[in-house]
Amino acid sequence: MHQQAALILVDVQPDFMPGGTLACHEGDAIVPGIDQLLRRHLFQQTVATQDWHPRGHVSFASVHAGMAPFQQIQLYGQPQTLWPDHCVQDTAGAALHPGIDWSSADLILRKGNRPDVDSYSAFQENHGPDGSRPSTGLAGWLRERGVHEIYAAGLARDVCVLWTVQDALALGFRANVVWDLTRPVTPESDAATRTTLGELGVGIVQSAELRA
Ligand code: VGL
Ligand code: ZN
């Protein structure tokens, strides 16, 4: 048991896997390993996030005239990548992946439900119209349970997983990425992601190294 540690499974949803609308490279390859990891009950708490957008969400390229997916705009003074429509509430692509037994998850946190604000990290929404990044409440939830360290896995390695560990560190948690149980939207980003994680002091671990 990793005492005082939480596993955070980020956006393990069909839309981020081959056949989905915003597929990560080999995104489905992490499903068996995550299911096996959950069955080992190594962590004091397990949290799953679920990207959960209303139709017409501000992050969808389809709502910005003349814009295409993966282009960037400025939104509330910050860069915002525009995405294909994905993880629309109550669609199959937005479900927690059916190949995983989620019954041991202690908390399922839906994010990105505000129409005008995107939300990558499990801890804080992206910048809103007033320039702030509202808390999701996760940091307090973890602290109340004595958690000081997080292990993040899921999708996407270069977007929501990365933002989650960056916020975790900024909020005073030790942070690790379970590298083999993540996949990127942009495979070319892997070298930069590793460099960023190393510079921040985020641990990069493999699921096979995790021990009871
Ligand atoms: C994600 C882009 C848009 C992710 C979510 O889960 O990494 N990426 N929404
Ligand atoms: Zn999203």
Image: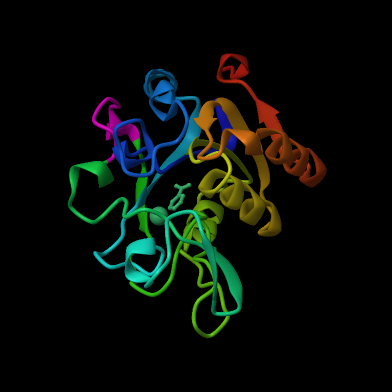
- Which residue corresponds to the image point at 38% horizontal and 24% vertical from the top-left? 31
Screen quadrant of the N terminus: top right
Q: Check the image and name the residue furthest to the top.
A: 208
Q: In this view, does 122 lie above or below 15?
A: below
- Which residue corresponds to the image point at 44% horizontal and 24% vertical from the top-left? 30
Q: Check the image and name the residue furthest to the bottom.
A: 130
Residue 104: quarter of image: top left
Q: In this view, does 107 lie above or below 128?
A: above
Q: Check the image and name the residue furthest to the front.
A: 66
- The answer to if 102 sits in the magenta stretch is yes
Report x, y in % for residue 154. 47, 36
Render colour scheme: rainbow
Residue 106: quarter of image: top left
Report x, y in % for residue 81. 51, 60
Secondary structure that dominates the magenta span = loop
Start and end of the magenta stretch? 96-104
Q: For the image shown, how many numbered marks are present on the structure?
A: 0
Give the quarter the ligand 2 occupies.
Answer: bottom left
Q: In this view, does 208 lie above or below 123?
A: above
- The answer to if 70 sits in the magenta stretch is no
Report x, y in % for residue 130. 53, 85
- Which residue corresponds to the image point at 48% horizontal and 56% vertical from the top-left? 141
Is any atom of residue 60 visible in this view? Answer: no
Screen quadrant of the C terminus: top right
Answer left or right for 196 relative to 175: right
33, 14: nearer the viewer: 14
187, 151: nearer the viewer: 187
- Which residue corresponds to the image point at 55% horizontal and 48% vertical from the top-left? 159
Is any atom of residue 36 visible in this view? Answer: yes
Report x, y in % for residue 25. 47, 30
2, 194: nearer the viewer: 194
